Image (cartoon, grey):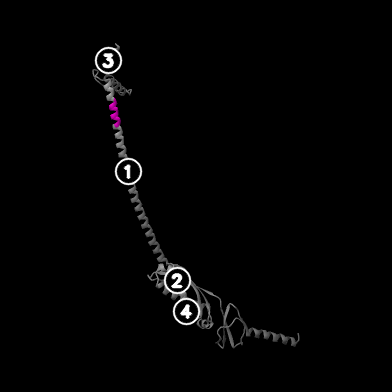
Amino acid sequence: MNNRGMGVLIILGLAIMLGAQTMFVIKETERGVLLKFGQVANPDLDKGLHFKIPFVHSLHKFDGRILTLDSSPERFLTLEKKPLDVDFYAKWRVIDTFKYYTATQGGDESRAHRLLAQRINDGLRNQFGNRTVHEVVSGERDLLMVELTQKLNEIATTEFGIEVVDIRVKRIDLPQQVSESVFDRMRSERQREAREHRSTGKEQAEFIKAAADRERTVIEANAYRDAERIRGDGDAKAAEIYAQAYTRDPEFYNFLRSLAAYRDSFKGKDDILVVDSEGEFFQYLKEDKASRR
């Protein structure tokens, strides 16, 4: 290669280097600030191709998309001075590149997160301090987030050039020691309710048992009364029959009664009966024997 060709390559290389130093592109997802000798010359560059003078101008690019601040859990006190551990996140984006560049000292995203997290913590502390635990964990939490987003958005836009798109609470927990005391109280309440239910059940069981005993006593008394009445009716009927039989033939009636007495007296083989031989108990046996003679 001759000297002329070498010179062309050198010039071409210098042109490429110069172009790389003087031309730049702002993408659709980016925001940019152009500085001149360290001072802001263009606070918000448009999308597309731009030119700058090397060693005179410097460029700072920022992410123009919606970004996420994912904070670590923080502890806040409610209106009743009860501590809550709150884990939240925020969605934000740059809308004023000059304010953002100035507030974050050159567009440092981590510094922007620290500034924004501090403002959110202050806002949550104020919001939680004016509400009870029930209000915080109930439906008012959505209203709380809306109010906080609106108030914080005004501050962030004015001070940092940031738009706060949304703030959401991921979870709200009681501290460990508070959780244990709450669980102990809940356990005690459940045990107390269980004792009350058992006591009520025992009272109801005693009442049911007493009612059943009373009903049984009434039924038995009625049954005994009916049985005695029936037995009395039967005895009266039997007495009537006996009376009629005795009236018709007293001698035959006495004979049948004696036979029944003999049968009842000699049921057992080992029974021993001691009576007066001259008594009336065996009168029909004697008469039968005498008649057979």
How many neighbours does mark 3 have within 10 angstroms: few (below 14), some (14-19), or many (20 or more)?
few
Q: Amino acid at mark 2?
A: Leu
Q: Amino acid at mark 4?
A: Glu
Q: Nearer the viewer, residue 278 or 232?
A: 232
Residue of label 4: 154
The secondary element bearing badge 2 is classed as helix
Q: Measuring 35% from the left and 55% from the top, which residue is drawn there?
A: 196
Amino acid tagged 3: Glu
Mark 1 neighbour class, 10 Å CA radius: few under 14, some 14 to 19, many 20 or more: few
In percent of the image, x 63 and y 84: which residue is there? 23
In the rendered structure, which disc, 2 or 1, sits on the residue that comes first in sequence?
Answer: 2
The dot on residue 287 is 3
Precedes in sequence: disc 4 or disc 1: 4
User: Which residue range is magenta in the image?
Assistant: 233-241
**Pointer 4 or 3: first along the chain:** 4
Measured in 3D between alpha carbons, the distance from the residue under mark 4 to the one under mark 3, in whole angstroms, is 138 Å
How far apart, in angstroms, are the residues tagged by discs 2 and 3?
121 Å
Q: Is residue 278 above or below residue 152?
A: above
In what element is the residue under mark 1?
Answer: helix
Residue 208 sits above or below residue 223 on the image: below
Which residue is the site of mark 2?
143
Give the mark nearer the N terminus: 3 vs 1.
Answer: 1
Picture quadrant where residue 238 is located: top left
